[in-house]
Amino acid sequence: MKNNQLHLNVTFALMNTTGLKVAFHTLGCKLNFAETSTIARNFVESGFEKVGFDQPADVFVINTCSVTQNADNETRQIVHRALRANPEGVIIVIGCYAQLKPEEIANIPGVDLVLGATEKFNILNYLTSLKKSDKGKVHSCEISEANVFVSSYSIGDRTRAFLKVQDGCDYKCSYCTIPLARGISRSDTLDNILTKAREIAGQGIREIVLTGVNTGDFGKGEFGNKKHEHTFMDLIAALDEVDGIDRIRISSIEPNLLSDEIIQFVAQSKRFVPHFHIPLQSGSDYILGLMRRRYKRALYADRVALITSLMPDACIGADVIVGFPGETEAHFMETYEFIKSLPISYLHVFTYSERDNTPAAMMPGKVPVSERKGRNKMLRTLSAKLQRAYYESQLGKIHTVLWETENKQGYIQGYTENYIRCKTFWNPHLVNSTQRVVLNSIDESGIVRVVPVDSPSYPPSQKDNPVFQPLDETLRV
């Protein structure tokens, strides 16, 4: 990519960038945020000023997701927002939706340029003028050509940085378009990731979140081949030795790749936090088979059991898809009861939607949309109960909060190492710092109020007897 970057700068030097403004909007996952941040830095290095998306920029870059139909619809809304901010601004659409349906995007009024999976990283090469087009121009590769890893990380917008370690996926889940949008599984080199982690630490960032499409598959394609030169275990062991970072969080990892060794390592790690996000998708082995997932529910339960035995206060999140073709009410209730039986802390619930060129779209047994929505609502309600119960279980305990940067109505907010959202009275000296606190009470919005461990108003004798709002009986699991 160094050669591409050099060519990018030489080509773009032909355009005077003085006074030009660029705005970015990102849809979807942490991986997209990491890539948007890297692309934004390229613009700034080339002379652009980065501004907010609702400001009248000269160039608008929209990084898209295409996990569900809603993500596609949202892209159109974001294009309209850009046009309202500046009808003459050049609008460029990149990301998964741009790779999957470039012509569809090119026909959206106002779109000038559509770049696919590999072209997005050379975006400045394709921006040859600032004139609006009658129809969007498409530059999109065959997905088989998306076989090179491009390093990315987010910085500057958050207290934490999203560090991309892996891209693409070789799994063939029957509902998923990601392999069609991002290509084969491939990884950054271990040495380069360590270099990026040190760069992040050098800029004062306290927490790194490891991101990828299939993060646990790290090591495949590390040097352009399909073999694993290193494993995910090698990666986290090496990152644990990087000075200057307080915390490292694993964004998501497949249950079949979450080994005993990884769990045991996190349990005694210096920097990796007790927070696991483990996609479940269904609690029915029959539906898991239709989805072509690589595990059964028993393995999932075993992973959760080992985590909680070694880290009793660990936060465990799960992804779930409802309304998959063939999912009967009985299958759904099997999922519902399975989740209730586990110490899950929260859910990310997705309503199944048919995606072009996926096997699931052709499967029989389609679930009516109204039933899909009803099941989604049930699981979201369950998620609220699970999170409240988890938060209550932590009251009176001492944890470390990483405080964020924003003053929210007189309060500063942050997350504990085990992913509990906390707040205390605004204090600018707390920004981007860690603090040991007692989790004291839960406010009406579900955020935990805390008291510093060294607070004179909270002597040790009271720490085991917190006062908090009891859980509404209607939310009881």
Image (tube, grey):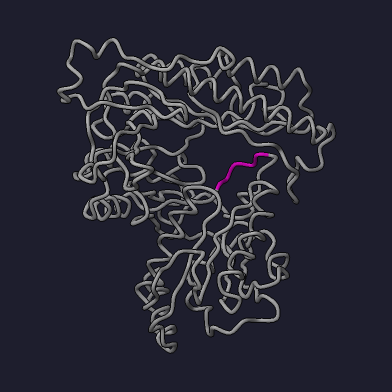
Residue 435, image x and y in percent? 22, 33
Quarter placement of the N terminus: bottom left
Q: Is residue 339 left or right of residue 327?
A: left
Look at 29% across and 10% down and name the residue there. 465
Q: Is residue 229 left or right of residue 279?
A: left
Say if 172 sits above or below 84 in the image.
Answer: above
- Residue 262 in sight: no
Please state which of residues 311 and 239 is positioned toward the viewer in this rendering.
311
Say if 270 sits above or below 1 in the image.
Answer: above
Please report the bounds of the magenta region as a residue range.
169-173
Q: Main secondary structure of the magenta part?
A: loop
Say if 435 sits above or below 25 in the image.
Answer: above
Residue 125 is covered by the magenta coloring: no
- Residue 1 in sight: yes
Residue 377, image x and y in percent? 67, 29
Quarter placement of the C terminus: top right
